[in-house]
Amino acid sequence: MSANTLQRLLGKGFSIAAGIGFVIGLGILRTPGEIATTINEPVPYMALWVVCAAFVLLSLLVVAELIAITPRTGGIYALVAHAYGPYPGFLIGWSDWVANSASMALKAFVLAEYVALLEPRLAPYVKVVAILVSTCFAMLQLRGVRVGATIQQFASAIIGLIVIALAVSLYYGAFVGGGAAAVPDVEVPRGNMSWVALGTVVAAVVYTYDGWYAPSYFSGEMKSGARAVAVGSLQAALIVAVLYILLNLAIVVSVPLGALIGHELALAGAIEAVYGAGAGTIVVFAAIFILLSHQNLQYMVASRVLYSLSTDGLGTRRATSVNDRGTPAGAVLITWVLTVFLIAIGEFLLLLSLVTIFFVAMYVGLVVGVFRLRRQEPDTERPFRAWGFPVTGYLCAAGWLAVALFVAATQWMSTIYGVVLTAISIPVYLYLKRRRHLGEGDVAEGGGAQGET
């Protein structure tokens, strides 16, 4: 086996853990408060979570076909490159790598801030703590893919139990402990239901479910092949949808939604409303654990993106090295350097805003990619076929297009950044292509040895 080839060492359980771990983040702890500023009636509030969950699951039932016929490590990069060719893959791949690195930097910083809340003496050293946390997880990755996978399966199981425990505590407070009766009703101003406000909360909920494609980052390393990745993605998304709906229902029955407005961690506000001041500290501990889990998983994800780009001649040769434990060590180290640099200079939010529009457009592209490959590769074996296609494809494409247009219109600076970055990327791509002496076909087929045994 080549020293630069990833190995098939991951089982189906990891694909489910990756999906759960990538989706469940701080969003579910914070978003209920953001939604309550616009929708503070229980029935429409719950309807929003249920409808968005159904839409995401329907989208995955379509995109799972693309995942199942793309047995390459690399996630969004591999899927987009398969459906549209090397340049779109290059654009979204580099955006994805930068976004994951910036996200890790942001989460390490937020994690350090939460630690400082619990131990104020650490407040002057937030950046140092963040860099130490990021460095520890980079070192863990170098110990092997099985180590990272085991950590993630354990972490995702604990995260699921945390969500269940928080929901149960709210149900208990509402129906057994008499907590709900003790929570005063909150007068909330009405009339904030503009189309912009409604679009904002819909986008917020959809983003809270974001990450359902996460198992595809490891398709070339799965023992059972890409179909298992597609099925694992669906199973993970369904589990998360059930957990989110149960938790939000617990919030609705335990506290007035208006009580969540203004809380940075809305779930902590709900717990404190039921159990009293200080009880919400448990949510801070939950947030720290989730952020630690994301450090592990996003190092795995980001390094796979950079590895795949580099094996296709669209990155650096240093990122193609794989150690004897199956980890793309070069890509991990380069990702660590960027992440630590971003923590040190504190510019992770700017980078995340730069690439926002690419990811909104990506959702449209993934759905349309299924149509495109049905036409271009009609004879390709499809171990998973899109459910209800083409009707479901049209519905999902229209839905994601509406979200994309809304984001483009309301976050116009991100749209401008996207246009500028696209213009810059064209000469960079042409330079890399010329430097590596790669034709269009070579790039599309590059990295095909991923996962071979």
Image (cartoon, rainbow, N blue to C red):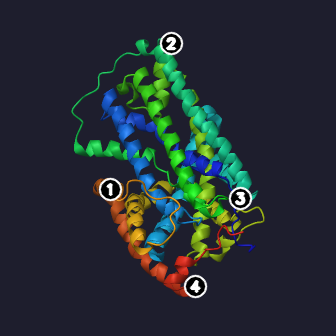
Q: Amino acid at mark 2?
A: Val
Number of numbered markers: 4
Which residue, given by chain and number where applicable, does mark 1 sit on?
391
Q: Amino acid at mark 1?
A: Val
Q: Amino acid at mark 4?
A: Arg
Which residue, given by chain and number where applicable, does mark 2 sit on?
176
Calculate the distance from the C-alpha at mark 4 to the C-alpha at mark 2.
67 Å
Q: Is residue 258 visible?
A: yes
Which residue, given by chain and number where applicable, does mark 3 sit on?
9
Q: Is residue 329 left or right of residue 295?
A: right
**Residue 114: x, y in percent?**
57, 38
Q: Which mark is residue 418?
A: none
Query: Element at badge 3?
Result: loop
Q: Nearer the viewer, residue 255 or 266?
A: 255
Dot 1, crowdedness within 10 Å: few (<14), some or many (≥20)? few
Q: Amino acid at mark 3?
A: Leu
Which residue, given by chain and number where applicable, does mark 4 sit on?
436
Q: Earlier in the sequence, mark 4 or mark 2?
A: 2
Q: Earlier in the sequence, mark 4 or mark 3?
A: 3
Q: Nearer the viewer, residue 390 or 245?
A: 390
Calculate the distance from the C-alpha at mark 1 to the C-alpha at mark 2.
46 Å
